[in-house]
Amino acid sequence: MKAVIQRVLNASVTIDNSTVASIAHGLLVLVGIEDLDTQDDIVWLSQKIVNLRIFGDENQVMNLSVKDSKGDIIVVSQFTLHASTKKGNRPSYIKAAKPQVAIPIYENFIAQIQTDLGKSIQTGQFGADMKVSLLNDGPVTIIIDTKNRE
């Protein structure tokens, strides 16, 4: 799994001119799923995201997690995170899992984050044409790949 985590002052997801998710302070998480992803990847990534200390404490030092700061999370599926640009100018998405594999992993990931965060989160809609808006705070943007746990 690959994730792009953005600390936001606000974020929203719109589908067909209707807002389906909206948060103030928190994280916008774009997640890409591949065939080799497992429950271990789901648990590890969820715990990493929920506990990632990228929010300011009373001294404005990044010492707090989204959980500590009582922030919210929006998770959006994004297969393009697995784009390969090695050859030519047209990206290949061969590593991205097909929906029949990706949807159950995506749903389990959402459930795991809700468990780890201790509250419900908001999401986009898998496979939909989504418009994602955000006001990045910092900007703080972190990229995590569960296959490269350094």
Image (cartoon, rainbow, N blue to C red):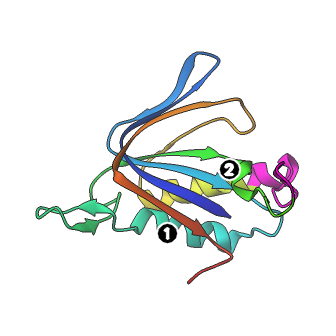
Which residue occupies 83% across, 61% down? 95
Which residue occupies 75% across, 37% down? 127
Q: Amino acid at mark 1?
A: Gln
In the foreground, 9 or 49: 9
Q: Quadrant of the C terminus?
A: bottom right
Residue hosting label 1: 47
Q: Is residue 118 left or right of residue 42?
A: left
Label 1: how many residues lie within 10 Å, few (<14), some (14-19) or many (20+)? some
In the foreground, 34 or 109: 34
The answer to which image quadrant residue 82 occupies is bottom right
Q: Which mark is residue 107?
A: 2
Q: Where does the image place residue 31, in percent across and percent down from the top left?
A: 63, 54
The span shown in magenta is 88-104
Q: Is residue 92 left or right of residue 19?
A: right
Label 1: which secondary element = helix
Q: Is residue 91 left or right of residue 57?
A: right
Q: Is residue 36 above or below residue 100?
A: below
Q: Is residue 96 magenta?
A: yes
